[in-house]
Amino acid sequence: MDDAVILSAPLFAGLDPQEAQPLLDALTPVHLTRGETLFNEGERGDRLYVISDGKVKLGRRSSDGRENLMAVLGPGEMFGELSLFDPGPRTLTATAVADTTLQELSHADLVRWLQTHPGMSKFLLGALARRLRRTNENLADLVFSDVPGRVAKALLDLSTRFGHPTDDGIRVAHDLTQEELAQLVGASRETVNKALADFAARGWVRREGRAVVLLDIARLERRAR
């Protein structure tokens, strides 16, 4: 386990490594292969997860089988924190989009630790607030933004967490299929592919399988507004 990555999660914010050690010792590693589901929407949840390596998508499926991705998370990010405040049914399905290692923390261990570190609750609440803000932004985008604007915004968001500078731009290895990228944007695969093809023709991006190189950040930012 890479302690530096785990300590970057909101749960450990403000803690020095020695203070965080009891909580680190309570973590249990979980390994997933690409496409493997950790839990399904509706299952009872009593675990919080921190990603130490890989990527996880969080999504919901409609009654007719359509899927909508709410988020794609990577190293240092956590999910399942709602189980601290409400150990009830999961509201989302969590699936690995790459080979992934998670660190699992039970509800009981987390509550026990917070009883001795009550001030740390504010960091969990902060993480929940950021998740809610992101959800509200996504809803607003679906109402007010066109598909190319949402695609540009999604690429920029993915680049902040998974991007690595190259000689000609920022390479984002998102590990998403075309269908998953479309689900993240909330549009059809054909419409999203058309937007990406237009961006590529303009020289804003270069597509590389399950990765994309952002060549013109400024124009993408303007298109995302």
Image (spheres, rainbow, N blue to C red):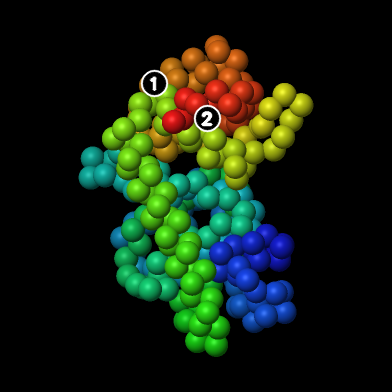
Q: Is residue 181 above or below residue 102?
A: above
Q: Is residue 224 left or right of residue 139?
A: right
Query: Which mark is drawn over residue 148?
Result: none
Q: Which residue ends up furthest to the bottom in the rendered image? A: 116
Task: Identify residue for label 1.
Answer: 190
Task: Pick the residue in front: 25 or 9.
Answer: 9
Task: Pick the residue in front: 92 or 82.
Answer: 82
Q: Which residue ends up furthest to the right in the rendered image? A: 167
Task: Pick the residue in front: 9 or 32.
Answer: 9
Q: Is residue 22 above or below residue 79?
A: below
Task: Identify residue for label 2.
Answer: 221
Numbered disc in front, either 1 or 2: 2
Q: Is residue 35 left or right of residue 173?
A: left
Q: What is the CA distance from the residue labelled 1 to the residue labelled 2? A: 22 Å
What type is the residue that disc 1 sits on? Glu
- Whether label 1 touches label 2, CB < 8 Å: no
Q: Which residue ends up furthest to the top in the rendered image? A: 201
Q: Residue at x 58, y 50 (%)?
A: 74
Q: Residue at x 52, y 64 (%)?
A: 49
**Label 2: how many residues lie within 10 Å, few (<14), some (14-19) or many (20+)?**
some
User: What is the secondary structure assignment of the residue under circle 1?
Assistant: helix
